[in-house]
Image (cartoon, rainbow, N blue to C red):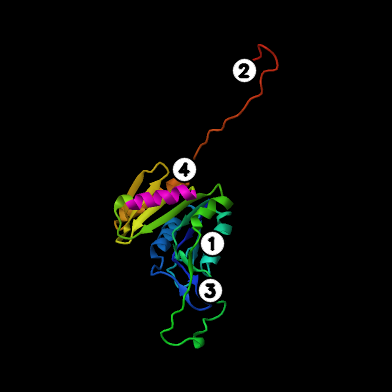
Amino acid sequence: MRKILISGGPVHAHIDSVKIVTNRFRGGLMAKLASKLAMHFPCEVTYLTGKGAVQPHPLDNVTVVRHEGFFDYLEKVQSLSITHSDVILGAAVANLVPVSPWKDKFPSHDYQEGDIVPIDFMVAPRVITKVKAVAPQTNLFGFKLLSNVPYQTLVDAAYGVLLDSHAAAVIANDTKDLTLKYIVTREKAVHAFNTAVSVEAEAFHAFLWAMMNDAYYRTEKVMLAAPAAEGAALL
């Protein structure tokens, strides 16, 4: 039985002990994907998400694990990937992280109204590129979301993530229509699905399942020892 790790919902970064930087996504589509795979295919699903996000259906073969923000999410993705045959990373990660967050609550009593508070942000590490280092045998799938860009720009961005992460495929979509999904594979083929149509949504789930179960073969060069004597048979 396959063990699938799926992440969904927002992944926040901490400014202080109570304030966070996050995004508007709640993970409904990823929770639905987790539910559909668990209901229709022989697998166990671990769903990694944050508090307040949409949850998958309560099923016996679905386990929900919660993270506490970006760095906890990064650690949990790496540790959980080791024990899963397939990893699908679809969480909406806050890729801007405060460099020096306050350990406790921001001391607002030390400031006046209108004061400017400079907060340095860094671009967060790309989580998907960390998976293969700890789980080289897992089937890795990612999502790449852009907003109002040309189709080719979207596909090229997804393929760049695929190359950087050594993923099996990256699913590209655009905020202008999140139901349109383009599965970009290693050979840069693009498989389009309109998941608003039930039959295409089922085909999307079946396509991912087929990729998880696909067998990849590799060619290895083996150096044979030279024959011990003239006329010896060559292997």
- Label 3, secondary structure: give it: loop
Disc 3 target residue: 101
Whether residue 167 appears in this view of the structure is: no
Q: Which mark is residue 132?
A: none
Please tell me in which quadrant of the rendered image residue 36 appears. bottom left
Question: Which is more foreground, mark 1 or mark 3?
Answer: 3
Residue 41, relative to residue 107: is it above or below?
Answer: above
Whether residue 179 appears in this view of the structure is: yes
Packing grade of label 2 (10 A; few <14, some 14-19, many >=20) is few
Measured Cα–Cα span from mark 1 to mark 4: 27 Å
On the image, the x and y values in percent for residue 137 come to: 55, 47
The amino acid sitting under disc 4 is: Asp
Disc 4 target residue: 214
Q: Which mark is residue 234?
A: 2
Q: Which mark is residue 74?
A: 1
Packing grade of label 3 (10 A; few <14, some 14-19, many >=20) is some
Q: Bounds of the magenta span?
A: 153-165
Measured Cα–Cα span from mark 4 to mark 2: 35 Å
Image quadrant holding the C terminus, namely top right
Residue 190, relative to residue 26: is it above or below?
Answer: above
Measured Cα–Cα span from mark 1 to mark 3: 17 Å
Ranked by sequence position, the earlier of labels 1 and 2 is: 1
Dots 4, 3 in contact, CB < 8 A: no
On the image, the x and y values in percent for residue 86 come to: 50, 52
